[in-house]
Amino acid sequence: MSDGEPRAAAAPAGAVPAIEVHDLTVAYRTQPVLWDVDVTLPEGRLIAIVGPNGAGKSTLLKTILGLVRPITGWVEIFGAPYEKRRSWVGYVPQRESVDWDFPTSALDVVTMGLYGRIGWLRRPSRAHREIALDCLEKVGIRDLAGRQISQLSGGQQQRVFLARALAQDARLYLMDEPFAGVDATTERAILALLKELRATGRTVVAVHHDLQTVADYFDHVVLLNLRLVAAGPVAETFTSENLQRTYGGKLTVLTQAAESLLGERAAGGG
Amino acid sequence: MLDGVLSFTARNVLLGATILGVSGGVLGCFALLRRQSLLGDALAHAALPGVCLAFLLTGSKAPLPLFVGALAAGLAASLVILAAVRWSRIKEDSAIGIVLSVFFGFGIVLLTWIQKLPAGNQSGLDKFLFGQAATLVWEDVRVMAALAALALATVALFYKELKILAFDPDYAASLGLPMGRIEMLLTLLLVTVVVLGLQTVGVVLIVATLVTPAAAARQWTENLGVMIVASAGIGAASGVVGALASASVPRLPTGPVIVIVASAVLVVSLLFAPQRGLAWSRVRERRVTRRIRRENLLKDLYRVGEAEGTFARLVPAPRLMGLRGQSPARLAASARPLVGAGLVERRGDAMRLTEEGRREAARVVRSHRLWELYLTRRLELPSDHVHRDAEAMEHALTPETVAELDRLLGYPPVDPHGRPIPPPEAAETGTGPRRQAAEARP
């Protein structure tokens, strides 16, 4: 992976939105999971998708990635369908989505990020392994490259997944709960990585559960509960009123916490 | 080369069983890791009606039509399973169970009907239920070898795609890899193994040649490539042993013997494989338990000596048993290695620490009390809560960690209960902790 500008950089930054979701409705059998979602996400930001359990957050990511088919609506990535923008997008699935007892090493998993580029009938080469090692370095666990993945801690496994997405050298990263169940050190490392990605012009869209840290970690927020409740810059959108609408007033303790945080910010920022 | 030793039949059986063992071992790894062992079984059972229909349509038992029949039925079965999972409320395991029995039942109906046809008796299709390796002819072995070579070459060519299919198919799909087609390819390869095993092992037992070597191989390695090679080796070895056994012992069926040999390898692997083997983890547990008991006895002797102001007096066994509610047998078992190592001196029922034993005991007590202090100071746990935690940790602390704890806590003289912490010298030289500890007491 090269530093600096993303490999896929072609159009001038900011000319088209990173993601445009138009009129999207998704259902599993008869159960609607997303209803008429219309949202545009700008390039070069750290964007959180926030909402209660079962709000359709992961489904939104998977629909953007073309893994789930919508009933109506469409998604465009930098102005084109996903099929044409695949190489611009990196994906970090939920950590629990795979069997970590699989007989393979951390380096092997990271190399999988390059499978799309390696092509048919070819094996990963030494150069590919070098790229994978660099990506492990970036998440701070290069020394664990040869470790069997079940012998990694939860935080280290999460970093392996992040390194795998970095290997894709994408312009847009979609992450499903990257902070879930990680230790404090890993949380700081991931945050630093997100900021570095933003500094080099990449966009990150992450499903996020911890309302307390939304305002600190992200620039932009999408509040989702089957329908789109609100989307926009954190300062304007992440309000107690919107949270109340998203969570139906059930999480009063958390909304208060968010409110006080925003209050501090407002006071600090003048 | 084999001709001199074995009859032609035995040679055919040996080669056939080896070819099946290798291909089943390789493909079984992917079925196992995808948690689709049962799907392999369904494909095998579903092959029966396909084979029967192919025979009815072509009137021949040539390998190619049978292969096409088994393949068509296997694919139909896997599609029905997929459709049932996607469109109905039936879960995958139930869908596989239902499809397996329906296809197999239909196959048995067809088979019974074929038996009653004029040409049916000679068809030999009933051998496909449990296999009869002795019916293998040279031509069969050649077809098996060609099919197996094709299947193994396909695995080699699509190795990375098959690997990511087993590990993280959603992610692979996001990369643009056509996972649906790769999955279909794997199904095709599994059906190929089923067809390879029709005559040798039969549809009922084929799943064992897929799953058993793979499960055994998994116990020995954490690397997929090594696992595949090992699984192929175990499959081949089971095939060879099964073939030789049935060749030398009259009326011993080849297929079932192959399955029994592979299962024996699996049992040995589950018990004795280095990292995952159940026996080793039991041994490790026992070792730790015994060490903890020994260290606890040293500590108890030390405490008694501390309380009485001298380590020279013999401590009677009932008193030691009372401290931890131990049985005489357990106390004796803990004492024996300590006496052997010269740490404890025993006179009849009573015992005491030797000079060296006192140093060792001081080391254990030191870790315990430092750790207790650390818990109360750093985690602010009340002092009556920390003893149990310290009890669990003290045996796991390395000397470096203990030294670091000591430094962090500012070299404290006493633990949270006010009892002296033996200084490092007491654990090394044997100056005796009592005097120094007494001086340190405020």
Image: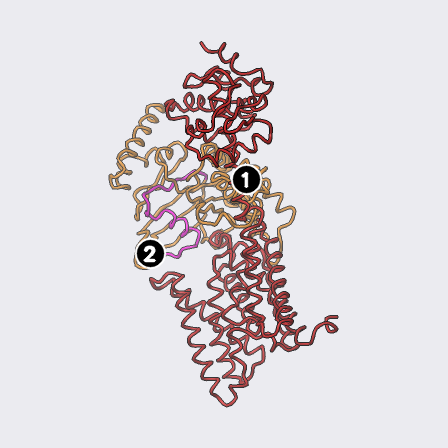
- Judging by the rendered image, the residue that carries numbered circle 1 is A5
Are the residues flagged by discs 1 and 2 from a single subunit?
A: yes
Q: Position of residue B17 (x, y in %)?
A: 61, 68
Q: Is residue B352 visible?
A: yes
Residue A55 lies in the magenta stretch:
yes
Residue range highlighted in magenta: A44-72
Report the Cα–Cα distance between label 1 and label 2.
38 Å
Front of the two marks 1 and 2: 2
Specify the colour of chain A. orange
- Judging by the rendered image, the residue that carries numbered circle 2 is A27
The three-letter amino acid code for the residue at tag 1 is Glu
Camera-nearest residue between B39 and A108 = B39
Q: Dot 2 falls on which chain?
A: A
Sequence order check, earlier mark of 1 and 2: 1
Q: Which chain is red?
A: B
Q: Is residue B156 visible?
A: no
The three-letter amino acid code for the residue at tag 2 is Ala
Camera-nearest residue between A64 and B297 = B297
Camera-nearest residue between B112 and B304 = B304
Horizontal side of B139 relative to B402 (left or right) equals right
**Marks 1 & 2, CB-CB < 8 Å contact:** no
Residue drawn where x is 50% and y is 39% of the image: A156
- Check the image and name the residue furthest to the left: A249
Camera-nearest residue between B348 and B354 = B348
**Disc 1, SS:** loop
